[in-house]
Each structure stands twice: as structure tokens, then as C-alpha cells.
């Protein structure tokens, strides 16, 4: 429950997949971000179907790299110039065993929210 709340409050999209590349969870930011491609309806779908063949092969290579060592847990995949963000794939493990992965977005824009602005 606590971990889900952390992910749900993240302003960046988080899409979690199992090792069969099925989308098993999308946080609210991801649902909104991928709305024009189906949003919440993407849950249960195969992530590979959302990518071209070159991207599919890269995803497969990353998952193989994750599986090769417990030390292989995060890899930088690209920079989105338009949104000024870096994107990573991150391994998900249960007691060291690879169980899936997720895509992590890190925006480089400065925060525009006021400090401690309790007036919402």
C-alpha cells in the first residue's frame, strides 16, 4: 500500500511490466501521458506492441542485461528534447530475482511550484 502510494503521487509516468512485457500497472501520470494511445486500457497489453521493431529489440536486450546480473539494475535509454527529460529502464527484483521492469522519466526543468504553498 505504501509503495503504491509513492508511485501514484509521482508526477512522472511510471509503467510497470512483467517479464512477458505485459503492462501490469500504470500510475495516474502514465495513464494521462499515454491517454491518446489508450491510457488505462493499455494495462494488460504487451508493451512491445507499442513500439517499433528497433525499440522492441532494445527492450529485449535490456531485459537480458538485467537478467545477466543482479548488479544490472538501471540503464539510460534516451533523452526527450521536446519534454526535456531523460528516460531509463529499471529492473524490478524480488529478493534478487528479476520479476519485471519499469520505465522511469526524469524531467530536467526547474520546479515551478512555490515552496511550501499550502494554498491549493
Image (cartoon, rainbow, N blue to C red):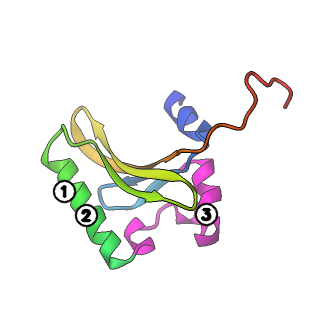
Disc 3 versus disc 2: nearer the observer: 2
Q: Which is more N-terminal, label 2 or label 3?
A: 3
Q: Quadrant of residue 34?
A: bottom right
**Residue to which mark 1 is pinned:** 64
Disc 3 versus disc 1: nearer the observer: 1
Within the magenta stretch, is there residue 48? yes
Q: Residue 113: x and y, percent?
A: 73, 34
Answer yes or no: do the residues labelled 1 and 2 have beta carbons within 8 Å?
A: yes
Label drawn at residue 11? none
State the residue at coordinates (65%, 37%): 111
**Residue to which mark 3 is pinned:** 39
Name the magenta segment's main secondary structure: helix
Dot 3: element: helix
State the residue at coordinates (64%, 65%): 35
**How far separated are the C-alphas under marks 1 and 2?**
6 Å
**How far separated are the C-alphas under marks 3 and 1?**
27 Å
Amino acid at each position: 500500500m505504501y509503495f503504491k502510494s509513492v508511485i501514484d503521487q509521482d508526477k512522472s509516468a511510471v509503467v510497470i511490466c512483467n517479464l512477458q512485457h505485459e503492462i501490469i500497472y500504470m500510475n495516474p501520470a502514465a495513464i494521462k501521458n499515454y491517454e491518446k494511445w489508450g491510457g488505462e486500457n493499455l494495462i494488460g497489453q504487451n508493451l512491445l506492441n507499442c513500439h517499433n521493431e528497433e525499440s522492441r529489440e532494445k527492450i529485449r536486450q535490456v531485459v537480458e542485461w538485467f537478467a545477466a546480473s543482479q548488479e544490472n539494475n538501471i540503464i539510460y535509454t534516451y533523452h526527450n528534447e521536446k519534454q526535456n527529460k531523460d528516460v531509463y529502464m529499471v529492473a524490478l527484483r524480488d529478493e534478487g530475482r528479476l520479476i519485471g521492469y519499469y520505465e522511469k522519466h526524469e524531467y530536467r526543468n526547474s520546479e515551478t511550484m512555490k515552496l511550501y504553498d499550502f494554498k491549493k
